[in-house]
Amino acid sequence: MPNKEIPTFEEWPFRVPNLEKAAASAKAATAALEAAQTPEEALKVFKKHEKESDLLGNACTHAFVLFTLDSTNKKYAKAVAKIDEGMPLVQVEENHFAEAMLHSPHRAYLEKKLGTHLFTMYEYSLKGFDDRVVAEAVEENKLSTEYGAKLAAIRVTYKGQEYNLPQMGKFLQDLDRDVRKEASQAYYAALSTHVEELEDIYDRLVHVRDAIAKKLGYKNFVELGYIRMQRYDYNVEDVRAYREAIHDVVTPIAAKIMKAQFKRTGIRKPEIYDNSLVFKTGNPMPKGTTADKIELAKKMYDALSPETSYFFRFMADHHVLDLEARPGKQGGGYMTYFPKYGIPFIFSNFNGTKGDIDVLTHEFGHSFQAYMARKIKVPELRQPTSEGCEIDSMSMEFFAHPWMDLFFDEPEKYRYAHLADAISFLPYGVTVDHFQEWVYENPNATKAERDAKWHELEEYYTPYKVATYRGCTYMQEGHRWLTQAHIFENPFYYIDYTLAQVMAFQFFNLDRKNHELAWKRYLKLCEMGGKYPFRTLVLRDHMKDPFAPGVVKKTVRPLLQVLESYDIGE
């Protein structure tokens, strides 16, 4: 169990990490490893270095979290800027340590104790970075941070009040079509004034990433991006075939879902502001305040399992749930982990929509995986690669379905909308991935050419949505991608969500047939952490590989019957 004596989040001491000292410490660890006379001595050096790395990671994570909670705070902004500048120097020394581990005369013993997968991870880290690209890496970090701050600072003026982007969500889903229209016009008008600066940041990011890739000897950043994402057991060709499977199988299903939605809502000529209205009587809205939702979540996780009961209450008691949108807070949602305390942190932007519950269950899934894998001693192996992480979070969303009556007056409508959204997400998710592949294969494309390519891909994967863009210049001109933070901050981190969604659907299908078996497999998956690469994790858990021919079709098509089974009225 985590340490109950841990202070609450507000009481944690804030210290700007000393990156120069951290780099020197890593360098000393490399020297000690190379000088180790016995296997036991080498292992001792490794363990000491990992503890120091955990402490550094804890300090950097704390600064990052505080900055995302208040991007206007100059102290936190300065700390993150210092980390952006100094971390590449630490990474250089970490690479030297990885190289020493790979070439150690005691490697056989270390592999036996630590696992062979760790050494594969070291090999990839050496392929993905070295001291030739420190200056470019610093610039990349700065640009990513600049993007996050710019997006958080955007304000939408609506009916005399100012809102950030997440806060507009409730108006964009309002039952009154005039409210949705007016809110939509205000939302896209605000975004339109920032197109040039956001595209400029991305243009610089593309060029600096391309430069890094070519300095490291790669044809383009696509190759390097896959290495950075630790894609050990699948490649670009696998992803391309998978994207086509989504297009062939899921795009027609998503189109059918949207057609049924407009028939249900009685909207004959749908505009972009109609896409978010799922039911004629209005979308399901969660009950109560944020505090109420936390109390209801306690009841849900009490009922789900002893493990979820203990851990959610532990997080609530330690104030590591920051859930409400507010000025200065960055958008989106995430989970991060503090190794010093053995506790995760959940960040989100509640705005009074059903998305609040989606995020609460999703990010808790990430947190729960960290809790279940806490006994893994090697830090690098506690958490799976990104697509593996997202299985844990997306599956938790579906395991929570039976308790939606706690949060909604009409829980069947929530279940329908959540499943319909999850299916319809898949074509959008592969659009993001396809776009990024094209961008980095064509790094010198103009901004206008990027926008045109995005629009072309939307017409291919989500034509049913493009048809509603006619009244919105911002979307017609191909700017939707500018608010998809992953494209800027985590290149190629998006196909992962779609792979995980297919896996989550597998758990959902199994859960409806045999809850005990589904939950047993889910716990096993969480406990394995990152001890194995993605496809191996899936197969060791006795689930189906989403890349395998026919798996997308066999997994997704039965979900149409599930949608039809929900009692949602007219």
Image: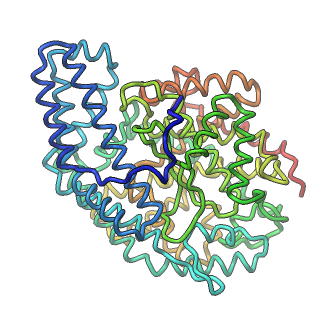
Give me the residue at 57% from left, 46% from top. 363
Identify whether 398 is placed above or below 212. Answer: above
- Left or right of residue 352: residue 392: left
- Image location (x, y in percent) of residue 510: 70, 28
- Left or right of residue 362: residue 237: left
Check the picture and name the quadrant holding the N terminus. Answer: top right
Identify whether 470 is placed above or below 351. Answer: below
Quadrant housing residue 563: top right
Q: Nearer the viewer, residue 275 or 287?
A: 287
Identify whether 279 is placed above or below 178. Answer: above
Quadrant housing residue 71: bottom left
Give me the residue at 32% from left, 55% from top. 440
Check the picture and name the quadrant holding the C terminus. Answer: bottom right
- Left or right of residue 207: residue 483: right
- Image location (x, y in percent) of residue 112: 31, 13
- Image location (x, y in percent) of residue 6: 49, 40
Quadrant housing residue 206: bottom left
